[in-house]
Amino acid sequence: MDHNWYRAQLEKQEIRLTEGREIILSVLADHLTEHPTVEEIYLKAHERNPSIGMATVYRTMDLLVNRGLAQKFEFGEGKARYELVPKPGEPGHHHHLVCKRCNKIINYDDFPEAEKQYLNIAEKGLSERYNFCIEDHQIQFYGYCGDCAE
Amino acid sequence: MDHNWYRAQLEKQEIRLTEGREIILSVLADHLTEHPTVEEIYLKAHERNPSIGMATVYRTMDLLVNRGLAQKFEFGEGKARYELVPKPGEPGHHHHLVCKRCNKIINYDDFPEAEKQYLNIAEKGLSERYNFCIEDHQIQFYGYCGDCAE
DNA sequence: CTGCGTGCAAACATTTTGCACGATG
DNA sequence: CATCGTGCAAAATGTTTGCACGCAG
């Protein structure tokens, strides 16, 4: 997938567009729904340009998260996973099902209406009640996948 | 709060009730809604009995999570937080609001009906569709608290 | 008395950081 | 050309593990 929208966002925010950032963005865009770890991103990026180091991946992912272009997930494996946020108007929003045994992660976007209904109520209510400016959310279900069921 | 119900669950599962485990359980019970980190649990436990080591806290928390007595959370701070699961029939179920700047964590349990409605639909649908045995879930909203709002 | 749990310290894994150099706008 | 970004290696942080000892059942 092409990552021009994300590049444009960075330019708009006056962030330098270096080769490392471009490559990392395109790696993420090519694996939009695979919530890769830093190491996985690093390996792919390093393949495309071996001069890219691990620290750049960490720094770039922080940047993308802070600028609202990516989301950080920690599913309890002891390492973070990342995903680009969907471009506005594009589908792609989803949540996660996590197997406690094999750590398989399944994306789902079923029940969008029921979900939207709850999230709208909650976001509105919470921001008023707790004086909180909500930017995003995560929903995870934990359990055992078919292969691991007890 | 007293932690007899949790002790009873461990006994029922034939887990040895050692002093360390008792102390850790009671620390958790006394801080039921404060999602302490391992270090915080360790400090309180160590206060009550200085012979308790860090490793015991890690091992005990793993045990409690695996036996379904505690839940593990990772809110993106790079360290895990834990909470005892509410005793059946008791209130206490809640979700979290996380400030991206100061890491303040607010518990909420507003909108229980809307939430229950969505969760029921989702759990049923997901377990059928993905052949997944769901044990628990987490919902988090991320943003900026009143003090940190941009 | 037997096996499980524990403390301790070492090992491990992930993430962060300081610094000198290089690239971007 | 001034600033910001980068690679590298070292450090910091959080978590896991091996081992010998000791307690629970």
Image (cartoon, coloured by chain):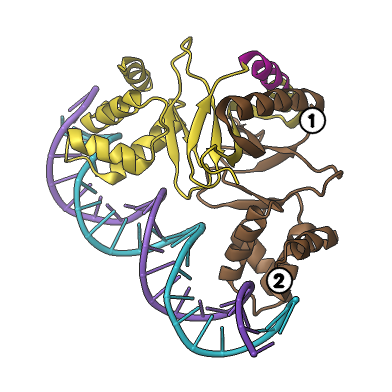
Chain colours: A yellow, B brown, C purple, D cyan
Q: Which residue lies under the disc numbered 2?
A: B16
Farthest residue toward the top?
A: A89
Tell me the kind of residue under disc 1: Asp
Q: Position of residue B82 (x, y in %)?
A: 65, 52
Instruction: Determine whether, in the image, residue B11 is placed left or right of residue B52.
Output: right
Q: Give the range drawn in magenta.
A: A112-121
Give the residue displayed 54% in from the left and 31% down from the top.
A96
Residue at 80% over, 43% down? B92
- Percent across and percent down for residue B124 are 68, 26
- Count the marks: 2
Query: Which residue is at a point 64% across and 75% down the rendered structure image?
Result: B52
The kind of secondary structure the magenta stretch mainly shows is helix
Could you say whether the residue bearing mark 1 is in a helix, strand or loop?
loop
Q: In this view, does B41 lie to the left or right of A19?
A: right
Give the chain letter at badge 1: B
Label number found at residue B31? none
Residue B81 left/right relative to A83: right
Image depth: mark 2 or mark 1 in front: 2
Tell me what residue is drawn at x 77 percent, y 40 percent.
Answer: B93
The image shows residue B23, relative to residue B115, as above or below, that is: below
Q: What element carries label 2?
A: loop
Q: Is residue B148 visible?
A: no
Residue A43 placed where, x, y %? 26, 40
User: Which residue has dot 1 on it?
Assistant: B110
Give the alpha-carbon distance from disc 2 to disc 1, as whole Å: 38 Å
Q: Where is residue D9 in the image (x, y as percent from the top left)?
A: 22, 60
Residues marked 2 and 1, same chain: yes
Instruction: Please report, as a chain letter, where disc 2 is located.
Output: B
Question: Residue type at mark 2?
Answer: Arg
Q: Quadrant of residue A80?
A: top left
